[in-house]
Image: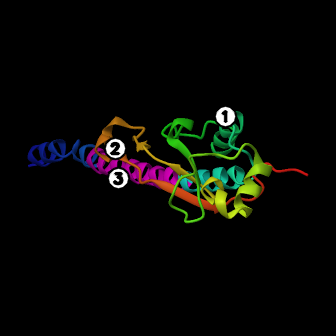
């Protein structure tokens, strides 16, 4: 009888290790999925902050190429590489100058910030007046860090902020 009891215990020796491995595999898979979803929400929130930073900067700078690049750099937190955030680059940021209706883009730009103030005050030049600035981030795609969760790869929604143009670089 002792022999049969000993052989019964011998059959059960590896069961605990197998059960632990299965539970640990499930636990760590769920844990890593939660981390990836949290990272996706972090990136979406970062996009919102980037558009706010870019819009705040765009309303006080002129629309020159150098200023456009400076605005994008500031929006991207001064080109500091965000941890686990390679999805958003300057190529994703669009700065649009709008007329008073908030929809129509300004196509014939004033010569400088002072000329913009003149255009905004002259009824005949209203289409040339930069009344507001829209900064948007489009075309960003969330890519999981771990290949196990490639099914979470998805385009991120557009983030957009429109602000009333302030000085646009005008100085006295």
Residue corresponding to mark 1: 65
Q: How is the image coloured?
A: rainbow
**Which residue shows up at 8% across the image and 49% down it?**
1
What segment is highlighted magenta in the picture? 20-45
Q: Is residue 77 left or right of residue 99?
A: right
Camera-nearest residue between 131 and 82: 131
Is mark 1 in CB contact (under 8 Å) with mark 2? no
**Which residue shows up at 41% across the image and 50% down it?**
156
- Indicate whether 170 appears above or below 87: below
State the separation of the CA atoms marked 1 and 2: 33 Å
User: x and y percent of residue 69 in the render?
Assistant: 66, 36
Task: Indicate whether residue 96 is drawn in magenta.
Answer: no
User: x and y percent of residue 154 in the render?
Assistant: 34, 46
Mark 1 vs mark 3, foreground winner is 1
- Which numbered disc covers residue 30? 3
User: x and y percent of residue 123 in the render?
Assistant: 67, 64
Category of crowding for the residue at label 2, using alpha-carbon neighbours closer than 10 angstroms: few (below 14), some (14–19), many (at least 20): some
- Indicate whether 70 appears above or below 36: above
Determine the secondary structure under disc 1: helix
Camera-nearest residue between 26 and 10: 26
Mark 2 vs mark 3, foreground winner is 2
- Which numbered disc covers residue 153? 2
Task: Pick whichever of labels 2 and 3 is earlier in the sequence.
Answer: 3
């Amino acid at each position: 009888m002792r022999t049969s009891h000993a052989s019964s215990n011998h059959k059960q020796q590896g069961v605990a290790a197998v059960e632990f491995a299965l539970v640990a595999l499930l636990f760590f898979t769920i844990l890593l999925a939660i981390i990836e979803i949290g990272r996706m929400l972090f990136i979406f929130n970062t996009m919102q902050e980037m558009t706010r930073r870019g819009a705040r900067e765009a309303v006080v700078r002129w629309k020159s190429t150098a200023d456009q690049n400076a605005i994008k750099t500031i929006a991207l937190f001064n080109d500091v590489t965000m941890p686990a955030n390679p999805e958003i680059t300057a190529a994703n940021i669009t700065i649009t100058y709008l007329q008073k209706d908030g929809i129509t883009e300004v196509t014939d730009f004033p010569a400088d910030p002072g000329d913009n103030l003149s255009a905004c005050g002259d009824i005949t030049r209203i289409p040339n007046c930069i009344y507001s600035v829209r900064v948007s981030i489009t075309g960003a795609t969330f890519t999981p860090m771990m290949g196990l969760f490639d099914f979470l790869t998805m385009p991120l929604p557009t983030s957009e902020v429109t602000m009333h143009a302030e000085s646009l670089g005008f100085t006295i």
